[in-house]
Amino acid sequence: MEKQIRVIARYHYSEGYFVEVSREDSVIASRDYWLCRKNSARKMYMFSSPYKNSRTEEHMLLTKISDAIQQYEHPVSFEKYA
């Protein structure tokens, strides 16, 4: 069985960053937010949230995007040391 996941919005930010908003066609009504950068194939999951309205959505993104960009640029390494 194949899931239908659609990109339903893109929020453009400075320095080539943007947030893709995707939604799975299912009973669950939440949206997933992914941080992306222009000319990069890499995406970073930010969070999921049910949709309330566009003003609330934009406010959530503005409060979380700075930390997300830091994580995108400096990912945590899960190296094991012996």
Image (spheres, rainbow, N blue to C red):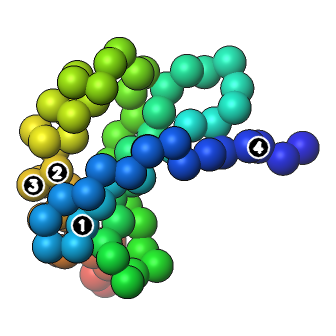
Residue beneath label 4, please? 3
81 and 79: which is toward the camera? 79
Q: Which of the two labelled residues, at mark 3 and mark 1, occupies the earlier sequence position? A: 1
Q: Amino acid at mark 3?
A: Ser
Where residue 17 is drawn, which disc sits there? 1
- At horizontal 31% and vertical 83% (from top left) the residue drawn is 82
The quarter holding residue 48 reads: top left
Helix, strand or loop for disc 1: strand
Q: Amino acid at mark 1?
A: Tyr
Give the distance between the C-alpha atoms of the residues marked 4 and 3, in whole angstroms.
Answer: 31 Å
Q: Amino acid at mark 2?
A: Ile
Q: Which of the two labelled residues, at mark 4 and mark 3, occupies the earlier sequence position? A: 4
- Residue 58 is left or right of residue 20, and the answer is left
Q: How many marks?
A: 4
Neighbor class of circle 4 (other Cα within 10 Å; few <14, some 14-19, many 20+) is: few
Q: Position of residue 8 (x, y in %)?
A: 51, 42
Residue beneath label 2, please? 65
Asked whether the residues under the numbered discs 2 and 1 touch, taking CB atoms below 8 Å apart as contact, a structural biologist would say yes
Residue beneath label 3, please? 66
Give the distance between the C-alpha atoms of the residues marked 1 and 4, in whole angstroms.
Answer: 27 Å
